[in-house]
Image: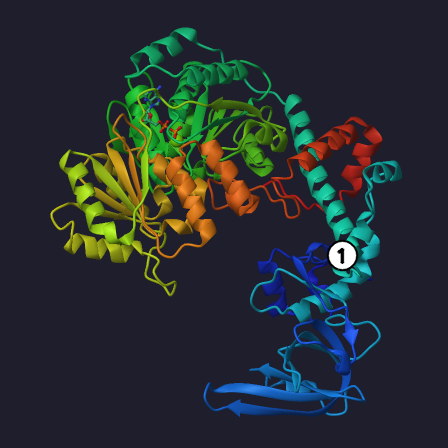
Amino acid sequence: MLELNQPVTALPKIGPALQKNLNRLGLETIRDLLLHTPFRYDDFRLIKKIHDLTIGEVATIKGAITSITNKRSPRKRLNITECFITDGQNEIKAIWFNQPFLTKTLTEGEEIFLAGTIEGNLLAKQLTNPAYEKAKDLTTHTGRLVPIYPLTSGLTQKQFRFFITLAWAAIKFIKEWLPDDILLQEQLISLPQALAYIHFPTNQEQIAQAKKRLKYEELLNWHLQLLVSKHELTQTLSPPIIFNQELTKNLVSSLPFSLTNSQRLAAWEILQDMNKNTPMNRLLEGDVGSGKTVVAALALANCAINNWQGVILAPTEILARQHLETFSKSLGNKFPLALYTRSQTLIFDGVIQPINKTSLKKIIASGEINIIIGTHALLQPDITFKKLGLAIIDEQHRFGVAQRQTLRQKTDGTYLPHLLSMTATPIPRSLALTIYGDLELSILNELPPNRQKPITKLVPEAKRAEAYNFIKKQLAEGRQAYIICPIIEESDTLGVKAVTTEYEQLKKGIFANYTIGLLHGQQKSEEKETIMADFSAGKINILLATTVVEVGVNVPNANLMMIESAGRFGLSQLHQLRGRVMRSSYQPYCLLFTQKLSPDGAKRLDYFTQTWDGFRLAEADLGLRGAGDLLGANQSGFSLSLHYTALTELDLIKQTKELAKQIFSQEKLLKSYQDHHPLKLIHLE
Ligand code: ADP
Ligand code: MG
């Protein structure tokens, strides 16, 4: 008997090769198959007589094959399969390109269905590359609303539809967990019904009902998991870290600037949280350049002076190294610091110097150093702490449940360190609070006072030389510049600038008299470090880079950025990039170059030149490109895996949150959810 947890290979015809392809889509079990839902449908419901077909319509025809042959098109060297079918009265021609095997699958005299768009003219109608299937009572690929699934290479729609029909034997194990009165109240169909409708709909209304139920499923899962995890945190202990006002005041007054009000408030909220004996779980959200690092430094210093250890995890080695430099200036005369990444181990005790990896691990384990900077390499099992009291994660929205478990393993198991996440992805407050119900929120809603608004220009290709001259003028004044290209190497995508090619050309050409650095993701980390350090120290005038500089990089002297093929980036991403040159009192410039633009693309870039508020840009991104792009995994580590719901559906997100609270507060309902929890549509990692 087929069961939900069996691997896909439990189905006949799925061997190791197909299994591998399915796994690549994240589909491992029969349950996963049933939950892999179509993203659109071909409407092949209309079954017509050949005589009644009209040009341009989409239809299904049933007929017998009168002939089927392969031909070669001499000009294009294509293989063409030509087939005639008759419905007893009339005949129609169908052709397929490059599918010569069809003459083996389909034979003369056989009854088949063909579906597709009717082409040709009044004299001769024709189908090109139609869907086909042998005639039977229940059709899968023709004669119905035919589902189209998101697939990768190595899998065909036909194969996948067939797998679904086989996996369907296990549908009886998917049970509804919501009680009838809630289904009624929310006007929802049951889960198994929803899956039946999504894979085998007979009309659009069924698809709509199915989607609604699946949206509820994923949103309820999402909210309930957050409620459960928030509740668990209130049952967990953390070491109270005493808010040391004197130290904090001293540090603040030794800074070369005064804190903004929102920095003060955020620091205060964080230090209050850390003072409690339950774990802080706070998100510090602040636009690029709003000064999150110094807030993190104050938290780490308070941790250290209480003789607890604190770590800050950066997404890249470049950033970790930068944090070491920053902290050595602001905290260095009070606390020793350590840097631990996969390829670098350094220590600061007056000066930054290398230390052997094993020795550093020992020092961390013995509790000799309380402030440890690093990448996620610090979460590896070989790192142990003496007394870990605080974990700060930079440029990510939240600790996943698994990451939190890893942190617990870094303690003696009786408590959890306080957690602070910091992110520059501007999610509007109400949305953030709704989708991150388990987090407290601090927002830096102002930039330091000395900042100037960026001058952003979309520059026509004809003015490129002028733009280069402008860069030279800024360099002559002692500034530095970034030039950003979307890709590393020249590719087939016509006209998209590659950073390596540009580097070679600019170095020999227009900027021959300047020092140019090259930075991209395929370089070794030592190479990247050296280049960043040189750029930081002013030894490099122009840094040619891909989006590796997108997150967190801080070189205040750089005030100009040129972005090639700017149309390839989302607004939020452009905003992150531009943020690199808005980190000092120098007038920032951002010059956008781009090849062909769609009207939408032009509108987007135009909006970008006029707007410097990250929140408004994010909202525009939502409107113009959809939630997936704004919050896609590729942007600043944010990944909210909603398949069915768009983040613009804020009302539904809020409505289901209320429902989730209702379920959470009723033991019986919560148990029903936890027992069945059948779909696990949402994974909180
Ligand atoms: P982000 O929030 O993007 O991480 P950073 O913490 O890197 O920003 O700060 C950006 C720059 O602003 C740094 O050079 C930092 O020293 C400076 N900075 C931070 N706070 C202030 C402030 N209150 N006044 C002036 N400059 C500040
Ligand atoms: Mg930062």
Residue at the farthest front position: 122
Q: How many marks?
A: 1
Query: On screen, 589 above or below 167?
Result: above
Point 16% across, 52% down: residue: 510
Which of the 4 image quarters holds residue 294?
Answer: top left
Mark 1 belongs to which amino acid? Gln
Residue at the farthest right position: 180
Which of the 4 image quarters holds residue 233?
Answer: top right
Q: Is the residue at mark 1 in contact range of ligand 1, meaning its CB lies under 8 Å from it?
A: no
x, y percentage for residue 41?
A: 69, 62
Q: Quadrant of the C terminus?
A: top right
x, y percentage for residue 551?
A: 39, 38
x, y percentage for residue 246?
A: 39, 6
Horizontal arrangement in the rendering, residue 205 relative to residue 470 (left or right)? right
Judging depth in this view, the residue of 454 and 106 nearest the camera is: 454
Point 79% across, 59% down: residue: 203
Residue underneath mark 1: 204
